[in-house]
């Protein structure tokens, strides 16, 4: 566990997000996993890229333009189109991960995630606040 993470004691209202930079630094297979989540249309678009391109992405809530990795951009668009019911029957971590992708990685608390996923916020908090970082999901610093 890194020093910064050990100083943060998340609560039910602590906002989390997918920290893609953490994931890139700590998981050598991150691109393989993410590519496996793409649909055929997104995979075809990704095939035309070298893999390190940054693209402009517009935050749907704030209209702020951010530069994101092309793979991240394609994933967020793919899951936004799938809708809410797509995560039913998946593990808790996978449902949380997909919820972040669907919302453009907008920060959400355990309480908000619980409402969105129909899961217990306390269980979500225990999972996300533990010593292990799942899929790069971390508290906002």
Image (cartoon, grey):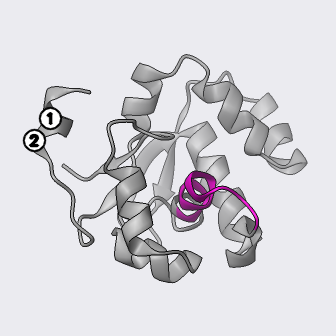
Q: Position of residue 14 (x, y in %)?
A: 23, 65
What segment is highlighted magenta in the picture?
Answer: 89-99
Q: Image quarter for residue 117?
A: bottom right
- From where the camera sits, is residue 54 visible? yes
Alpha carbon separation for disc pair 1 and 2: 5 Å
Proximity of marks 1 and 2: CB atoms separated by less than 8 Å: yes
According to the picture, the residue beneath numbered tag 1 turns out to be 4
**Secondary element at tag 2:** helix
Is residue 125 or residue 83 the one in the foreground? 125
| Residue 23 on the magenta span | no
Q: Is 20 placed above or below 127 here?
A: above
When asked about the image quadrant of residue 91, the answer is bottom right
Q: Taking 7 as reference, is 21 above or below it?
A: above
- Does the rendering let one see residue 61? no
| Place of residue 109 in the rendered image (x, y in percent of width and height, measured from the top left) | 33, 69
Please tell me the numbered disc located at residue 7. 2
Per the image, is 90 magenta?
A: yes
**In-image side of 74 versus 132 (left or right):** right
Say whether residue 130 is left or right of residue 55. left
Quick one: label 1, few (<14), some, or many (20+) residues within 10 Å?
few
Marking on residue 17: none
Q: Is residue 28 left or right of residue 10?
A: right
Q: Residue furthest left?
A: 7
For image coordinates 33% across by 58% down, the residue present is 16
């Amino acid at each position: 566990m890194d020093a910064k993470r050990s100083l943060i004691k998340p609560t039910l209202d602590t906002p989390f997000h997918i920290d893609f930079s953490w994931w890139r630094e700590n998981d050598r297979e991150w691109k393989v996993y993410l590519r496996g989540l793409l649909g055929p249309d997104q995979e075809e678009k990704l095939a035309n890229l070298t893999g390190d391109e940054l693209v402009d992405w517009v935050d749907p809530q704030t209209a702020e333009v951010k530069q994101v990795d092309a793979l991240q951009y394609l994933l967020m668009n793919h899951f936004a189109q799938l809708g809410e019911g797509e995560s039913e029957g998946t593990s808790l971590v996978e449902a949380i991960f997909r919820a972040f992708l669907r919302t453009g990685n907008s920060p959400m608390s355990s309480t908000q995630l619980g409402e969105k996923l129909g899961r217990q916020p306390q269980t979500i908090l225990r999972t996300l606040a533990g010593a292990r970082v799942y899929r790069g999901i971390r508290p906002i610093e």
